[in-house]
């Protein structure tokens, strides 16, 4: 082949075209691997367990606190008045605060008016787990974001990390503020953070979460997101559902119907 | 031997006598906790177990020095691995729970846990969260 300037430039041009394309591909590849590394994004394989919950706010009765009472009794959650020191695992939050990016001045009135039932979202990419310096908060294989109270040093990084306000700090000894003690579950001590554990202790015995069992209107559906035949998957397939603050990439396991 | 060196020797003898007395007194006082307590506290405190209960999850000889390690293992495996059943050396199964399994027999915290822990001067913080039998009511 003749080696001249014209041919060389032609080849260079063709090569650079591929080069530009491959730079994008490399970038994509890099992003994918880095994200996988950061979040251990495994994709949900069928027939593995990932616990999830659908809350149907159209069925949730206004003013009813059956699920909250059941949960807070089950887990010895103290009742402390005042926003600053209150401890909560499941509570009701104004729609515009629970769904800030989905609320607008023309939102359906009943949606906007009724407070939303909120709890820990047991995110697939939980920021609280990433920031915890002692690994007191960790993600179980079945998707539950769990706390090991023994390891918690009360630094409250997780509270800063959680975009849903799902975590509470024990500013004082909670025992005097527990109305009725449930002997089957420990209390917490001063200086420890706590949050919903998706009733891990009840799931271990094959029972449904306390909030779901307590709901008289069947507005809570709990089940395995990894099982395509589960009730929760059927609900998710047939109805339009929302997750809270999806724009943050946390991928909550709690879904809402409005 | 001159008179001067003799008196110096004598002085030395006197010092030695004082030193020995001092040493005996010092070691005697220093070791009071060992010989004064040998008659009274040698066997440790008496502990009380509820009557008519079955055998413990492991033998008494194993539990005495190792119960804290066992409880540590239990709490880690329950909380972190969701493994809630303990199988002992003879193949029996137990729920890994301080309040539900241990306290069934060792129901009196003051007479069982505290007596030994006070005697040994250890302060475990289990009870700041876990409920003793009296607190469960």
Image: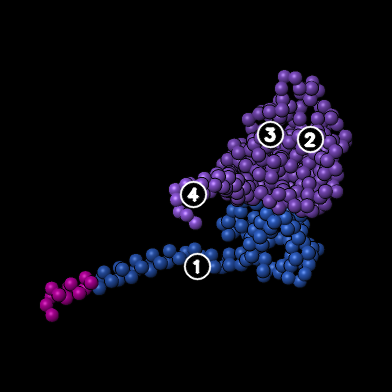
Label 1 packing within 10 angstroms: few (<14), some (14-19), many (20+) = few
> Residue at coordinates 64% horizontally, 36% vertically from top-left?
A248
Chain letter tied to blue: B
Report which residue position mark 3 lands on.
Answer: A245
Residue range corresponding to the magenta coloring: B1-12
Please tell me which of labels 2 and 4 falls first in the chain: 4
- The main secondary structure of the magenta stretch is helix
Q: Which mark is residue B35?
A: 1
Q: Which residue is pictured at 54% across the width and 47% down the height?
A: A14
Kindly check if marks 1 and 2 are in contact, taking CB atoms under 8 A apart as contact: no
Alpha carbon distance from label 3 to label 2: 13 Å
Out of A208 and A221, give the one closest to the viewer. A221
Q: Position of residue B103 (x, y in %)?
A: 74, 56
Subunit bearing disc 3 = A
User: Can you tell which mark lies on residue B121?
Assistant: none
Q: Nearer the viewer, mark 1 or mark 2?
A: 2
* Quarter of the figure with the C terminus of chain B: top right
Question: Sequence-wise, which precedes: disc 3 or disc 4?
Answer: 4
Which residue does the numbered mark 4 point to in the structure image?
A7
* Chain drawn purple in the picture: A
Q: Is residue B128 left or right of residue A227?
A: left
Query: Mark 3 touching mark 2, by CB under 8 A?
Result: no
Secondary structure under badge 2? Answer: loop
Would you name the residue on which mark 2 appears? Answer: A241
Q: Chain of mark 2?
A: A
């Amino acid at each position: 082949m003749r080696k001249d300037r014209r041919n060389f430039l032609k080849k260079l041009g063709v090569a650079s075209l591929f080069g530009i394309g491959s730079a994008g591909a490399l970038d994509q590849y890099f992003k994918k691997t880095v994200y996988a590394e950061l979040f251990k994004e495994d994709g949900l394989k069928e027939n593995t367990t990932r616990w999830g919950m659908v809350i149907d706010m159209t069925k949730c009765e206004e003013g009813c606190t059956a699920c909250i009472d059941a949960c807070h009794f089950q887990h010895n959650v103290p009742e402390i008045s005042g926003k600053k020191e209150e401890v909560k695992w499941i509570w009701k939050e104004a729609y515009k605060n629970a769904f800030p990016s989905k609320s607008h001045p023309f939102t359906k009135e009943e949606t906007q008016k009724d407070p939303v039932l909120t709890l820990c979202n047991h995110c697939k990419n939980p920021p609280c787990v990433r920031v915890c310096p002692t690994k007191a908060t960790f993600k179980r294989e079945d998707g539950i974001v769990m706390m090991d109270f023994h390891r918690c040093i009360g630094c409250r990084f997780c509270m800063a990390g959680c975009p849903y306000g799902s975590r509470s700090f024990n500013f004082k000894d909670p025992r005097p503020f527990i109305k009725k003690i449930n002997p089957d579950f420990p209390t917490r001590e001063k200086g420890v953070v706590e949050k919903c554990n998706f009733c891990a202790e009840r799931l271990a015995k094959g029972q449904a979460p306390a909030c779901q069992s307590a709901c008289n209107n069947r507005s809570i559906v709990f089940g395995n997101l990894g099982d395509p035949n589960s009730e929760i998957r059927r609900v998710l397939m047939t109805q339009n559902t929302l997750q809270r603050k999806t724009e943050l990439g946390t991928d909550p396991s709690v879904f809402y119907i409005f | 031997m001159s008179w001067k060196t003799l008196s110096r020797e004598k002085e030395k003898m006197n010092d030695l006598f004082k030193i020995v007395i001092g040493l005996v007194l010092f070691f005697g006082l220093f070791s009071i906790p060992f010989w004064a307590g040998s008659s009274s506290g040698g066997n440790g405190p008496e502990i009380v177990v509820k009557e008519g209960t079955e055998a413990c999850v492991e033998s008494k000889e194993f539990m005495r020095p190792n119960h804290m390690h066992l409880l540590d293992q239990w709490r880690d495996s329950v909380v972190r691995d969701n493994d809630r059943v303990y199988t002992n050396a003879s193949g029996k199964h137990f729920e890994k729970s301080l309040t539900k399994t241990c306290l069934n027999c060792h129901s009196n915290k003051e007479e069982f846990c505290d007596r030994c822990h006070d005697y040994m001067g250890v302060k475990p913080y289990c009870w700041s969260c876990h409920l003793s039998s009296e607190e469960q009511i």
